[in-house]
Amino acid sequence: MHRSAVTAVQHPGVDMEAKLAFAEFLLTDTDLQASSRRGIDWLAAHSTVQQAVVAVSEPGAGPLLLVAEHGVSSSAIADFSLSREEDGHPLIRALQQPGATYFEAGQIPFRSPIEGASFHAIPLRADEDPVAHGLLLASATGPELHPDVAWMARMLGRQVSRLLSRQTLAETRFGQERMLLYSIINAVTDPILLTDTEGKLIIANTHAEKLFAAPEDASEGWRRAVALNNMLFSAALSTSAVTHIELARRELLLVDPLEGSDLLFELLSSRAKDERQGTYVVSILRNVTDLARAKEEIEESYRTLRLAQAEVRDERHRLDLIIDSVADPILVTNQEGDIVLMNEPAERLFNVPPSAEEVSLRRVRANGANLTSFVSNVLTRSGEQRYRGEIQLSDPMSGRPLPVEGLAGQILSEQGELMWVVTILHDLTEALEKARLYEQLKQGSADLERKVQEATAELAEQNELLRRQHIALEQASALKSQFLANMSHEFRTPLNAILGYTHMLLNGVTGPIQESQRKSLSRIDSNSRHLLALINDILDITRIEAGRMPLNLSTFQIPELVYEVMAELEPIIKRSNLTVSASVRGGLPSLKSDRQKVKQIVLNLLSNALKFTTAGSVTIGATYDVKGRTVGIAVRDTGVGIALEDQIKVFEDFRQLDSSPARGYGGTGLGLSICRRLAQMLGGTIELKSQPGHGSTFTLRLPARLRRR
């Protein structure tokens, strides 16, 4: 035992406890087949070996007989027989080698229990024995022998040598026959069990062991499943024993230990009597789980079929309702061209009551012939399942021609065979009428397009004429502005002389004058100054239009400018008997703009308010918009007011609302026009709010900081 433990330590590739357990088993076992079987199972569990065979012979020249196998077919076991006298056989030569011999798959010139795989042939001998008593054939993935396989072969070789010294060849042959029996029942896919009458397991094949035996390393769930299966199986055998049936057949529900799922088996139990051993029970479990599932599936399919039939009937009913609700005729014909289904609109074309006149019957037959000819086009065109074309039909009752378009399609079975042809007929009468109207519309559209082109050409000619007239007007306007500027200058030169001499006469420079002369000179002075103001207005208009009005920017205070304007118009304010006031809020920012032009605008707005206000008040106010950074100067009066439709006209050149010779107010109508133009030059606007009889409010809005352009 110490020697085996030392040997196990020399090969750390496998768990030491497994090696020690195997070595202890060999020391206590006295059955050659059991030792060989344990060695094969150890290789299958602790190495990569997939197929393995142990063959031994008694000392001398006896044949090699198989005593244990794993992963090989029962036919290979039954066919294997090898005599030691066959010196030329590769396995006999391998038996005589001191170490393992490698045989590669595809290059093995003899029948071997290891089929379709490379393997090692390892002699089984004791350490001090030069003669091998058997062979271990183990599948391999390469020429190199794995240390664990070599260790197991060495341990098994010692065991074979020890046991063969005490056993006979007859025992070995009996073991081979028993192994062959195990191989045969293991080849059966159904679980097979041999038990006594109390249900104690004696023999079981591999498939039965999976259900009724648990390995040492099995989980707790596996063990419980096996215990439950044994209990259910024993109960089933007890029921069969009570009924005393020689061949009992019943269903048995077991548990799959690996997956935990339910398995349904058909249990066939039969009694076997032996004079020496007594009575045994042979049981075969046939797995009918899939059969039960198939039965359930068939029943479910039958229920589904009945539901499908009901759905088909409902679908047919719905189909009849649908096709009857369609306005177009729909027909279904078979391969022979016979109509098997049609809706109500189609019946009016292809079916008439027997009491109908002969002429109606002839029309129906003609329609059927035309339909058959149309459907035949679908059947004769290979590779095309649909056909579209026109059919000439007629109304069976009235005989009115019915041009229709037919669309026919094939309905094929799952095997690709033609079942029916479905034809839909669409009346083309409305479509033909629409086509005729479309052609008329198209012709009318062409005529309209031609007229539009002619009108466009004429309009282009007129536009060119207007463009030339516009150029001529601009040139005339420029000449007018230049003429007015020159004439205004020429007018001001003699007028200034008149004003100068009149002023000298009024001041007594040339001597004293009489009172009657003073009145005449005052009238001359007043009218001359009025004429000078008119000429200055015209000159301002022409300079603005010509773009020659200069800007002189400076920073000034708004209250000072407002009070300065009121001071200049103080004589007029006194004569007007109006209440004139200024409402200028504190905290206004200084204004950067052209002070003279701002003053001119405010002066003009205030003088207009005084002129057109006979009673009431005039107010000048100033505000600052922080968000827009603009200053607003508003002049409010309680005068006559301006209607909404006239509020734009007052800013036009030479425009007065009352332009008759008997108007009550003088002036040229240039004041507000000049103010609007000056405000635009300063980057601002003039707003007007007014109602007739409720006065007017003119608001000048300017940016607080004007930038030079």
Image: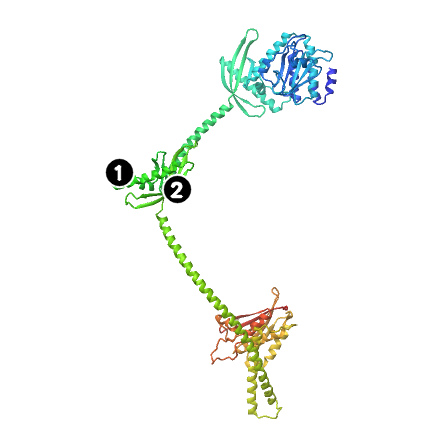
Amino acid type of the residue tagged 2 in the rendering? Arg
Q: Quadrant of residue 168?
A: top right
Q: Which one is closest to the eye, mark 2 or mark 1?
A: 2
Q: Reply above or below: 81 against 707.
A: above
In the picture as drawn, the residue positioned furthest to the top comes out as 275
Q: Circle 1 is placed at which residue position?
A: 354
x and y, in percent, of residue 124 in the image: 69, 14
Q: Is residue 198 visible?
A: no
Asked if residue 510 is positioned above or below residue 611 in the image, the reply reads below
Task: Read off the residue under disc 2.
Answer: 388
Which quadrant would residue 459 be assigned to in this image? Answer: bottom left
Task: Compare marks 2 and 1 and give the one earlier in the sequence.
Answer: 1
* Residue 501 rendering spot, x and y as whole percentages: 60, 88
Residue 360, image x and y in percent?
27, 41
On the picture, is 364 further left or further right than 377? left
Pinpoint residue 402: horizontal percent, then vertical percent.
32, 45
The quadrant the C terminus occupies is bottom right
Q: Is residue 185 above or below residue 672?
A: above
Q: What element does badge 2 sit on?
A: strand
Please tell me which residue lies in front, 557 or 246: 557
Identify residue type, mark 1.
Pro
